[in-house]
Amino acid sequence: MCGIAGIVALDSRPVSLEDIRAMCAALAHRGPNDEGFYIRPGVGLGMRRLSIIDLATGRQPISNEDGSVWVVFNGEIYNFQELRRDLESRGHQFRTATDTETIVHLYEEHGPRCVEKLRGMFAFALWDDRRRHLLLARDRLGIKPLYYAESGGQFVFASELKAILQVPGVGRELNWRAVNHLFTFLTTPSAESMIEGVRKLEPAHILTVAPGQPTRCERYWDVRFEPDHGRSEAYFVERLQALLEESTRLHLMSDVPLGVFLSGGIDSSAVVAMMARHHSGRVKTFSIGFADQDFSELAYARLVANAFGTDHHELVLEPDVTGIFHDLAWHLDEPFGDSSAIPTYLVSRLASQHVTVVLSGDGGDELFAGYDRYAVEGRERRLRFIPAAARRALSTVTALMPSGMRGQNFLRHIALPDAQRYVDATTLFNKARQHELFRSEVIELFAGYDPWAEAAEQCARADGHWLSTLQSVDLHSYLPLDILTKVDRMSMAHSIEVRPPLLDHKLVEFAATIPPKLQLHRGTTKYLLKRALRGILPDPVIDRAKRGFAIPLGRWFRGQLWEFVGDLLLSETSRSRHMFNPRYLERLTRRADRGRETDLDLELWTLLSFELWCRTFLGGDRLLEPMPQRGAARVARGQGDGGRGAAVPAAIGEAGSSP
């Protein structure tokens, strides 16, 4: 696992090694073991390495035999040994035992379509010196991140937004489309960042850049949920068991210690069960819980740990977590409205004391219909028989009700048609409440982009079963934008790699063929997955009620965090941005203090995350200090001096860059 960065000159200027060093220094947490550079006229590549496979010779950047193709790579290719054997039979010569080298030779054979051969998680940048073009690629599901921008005659890319901000000339202007999306759905958009002009390469896409030519971006893979109704339930159970075991076995490839994030839910428990079959020695498991038993799942995690004899480690999280909030803002890289980033950060810190690689159960809810909102939608679909006139009347009534009045949200919700109702269930601030939260001049900046309507349109494009449509929407949006972003940033903050076996693309393609009746069966979510794991996992784990990775944030806000919330959101610094209506923020914090609405917890967290991010990345040089570089530097094809440190928040200091 690594952090990658680079620059391609779109004009005749030379690329600065100093700039590449600064970008890589900002990514030191992603790769504390080593760094390397490739500098040639018009191009510079850099990387920070977290050594996992081929510890001795797997240093990057890596080239082909004649040095005409170079790559920097973040991720793991699980089928690289199979690919390597085929490439060697075609005459390619390898100098290392790492999976990274496979990419350059695969590119020589297949060009940009080489990505279609890869089975794994990846974001890589490949420079073809003969053709003078750069290829960027991101894995199919969006497990690993990749940002890019054009600025001052240069094309710049990196694993994280903060690295791009190290390049002189890259602006720090807010992207108002991203702000709109954040306060609607908790995240920034799929192809855009919070900074105007800095974009994300979307999952399953490749992008080609060459001086003097238009940038080309295209999708190379997609999955369609097309149920196979011609197969028996027994077939799906048997096939799922085989793919779960195969994928988990492939994900164990490592030259360093591995473990598992164990929540006590069925997805992570399934990974533990499959890992126990193939891992030599005791599996290490890591869990996090809370003193508040309404939120803690440690009892189920212990049950699974005992069943498989794991080396189990757990942490009970207390409400005094304000000390890590600035670290979260730095490592999340963008404002982020999912408060489960807090326990993910802390369980990653716990795991980093014992292992370098962790497997997770991410993706199971999207693939096997595990979200409670699917079951709720199944019940609420009966509301589609409400006449249109009655819906309009309900909408009128709710519009006349005072904001926050009991029952208002319920009436407004049931008045919506099917597609809009599902989107409403995942919305933070709807349009009406955005008009209360933001000043009018900000609302004007939102004009021309409606993420809510865009999402509703996607849900309405049902050409099959409604459940398959919603699973597809969540797989393409919620999973990469929320779940995978959170896990990548919070784990890499502590220099550990997280691998999600359930998101092997072969397993994903199979899951998309499972009939909806075997996904959500008589109100039971994950019906097929539970059938496949019956007799493998303890029955209480299979039969337990679904619980998300929630934290008692509302109770914390009304307790020890109350003063912190008020000081931050109602501060003069926050007011001086002239974005939010101060009176609405005051009402919001008062309502949360009284505990009237638990939904306010996420609203407050998103506001906190945004304010902390603004202070970290938009607050001026006063908040930034240079970070010392670590690891032995290596410059391929040309040496250079430099050493300008990257900018990091003063609040983090050494903790933000430690291995």
Image (spheres, rainbow, N blue to C red):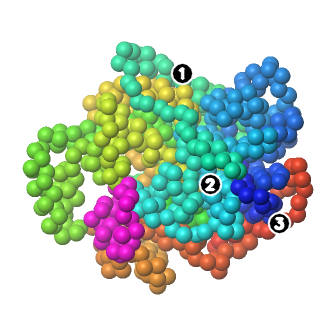
Q: At x 47% / y 45%, what residue is drawn? A: 479
- Name the amino acid, label 2: Tyr
Q: Is residue 191 visible?
A: yes
Q: At x 30% / y 41%, what residue is drawn? A: 460
Mark 2 surroundings: few (<14), some (14-19) or many (≥20) residues within 10 A: many
Is residue 465 or residue 176 the one in the foreground? 176
Residue 626 image point, x, y percent? 74, 72
Kindly identify which residue carries mark 1: 242
The correct choice, above or below, for 102 with respect to 127 in the image is above
Kindly identify which residue carries mark 3: 643
Regarding mark 2 in the picture, which secondary structure is present there?
strand
Left/right placement of residue 387 relative to residue 358 reads: left
Regarding mark 1 in the picture, which secondary structure is present there?
helix
- Quadrant housing the C terminus: bottom right
Regarding mark 3 in the picture, which secondary structure is present there?
loop
Q: At x 43% / y 68%, what residue is drawn? A: 607
Residue 159 image point, x, y percent? 65, 53
Distance between the Cα atoms at labels 1 and 2? 38 Å
Mark 2 or 3: in front is 2
Residue 263 image point, x, y percent? 50, 45
Q: Residue 176: which quarter of the image?
A: bottom left
Q: Earlier in the sequence, mark 2 or mark 3?
A: 2
> Which range is magenta?
427-451
Kindly identify which residue carries mark 2: 148
- Quadrant housing the N terminus: top right
- Name the amino acid, label 1: Ala
- Is residue 419 highlighted in magenta? no
Q: Earlier in the sequence, mark 1 or mark 2?
A: 2
- Is residue 446 highlighted in magenta? yes
- Name the amino acid, label 3: Gly
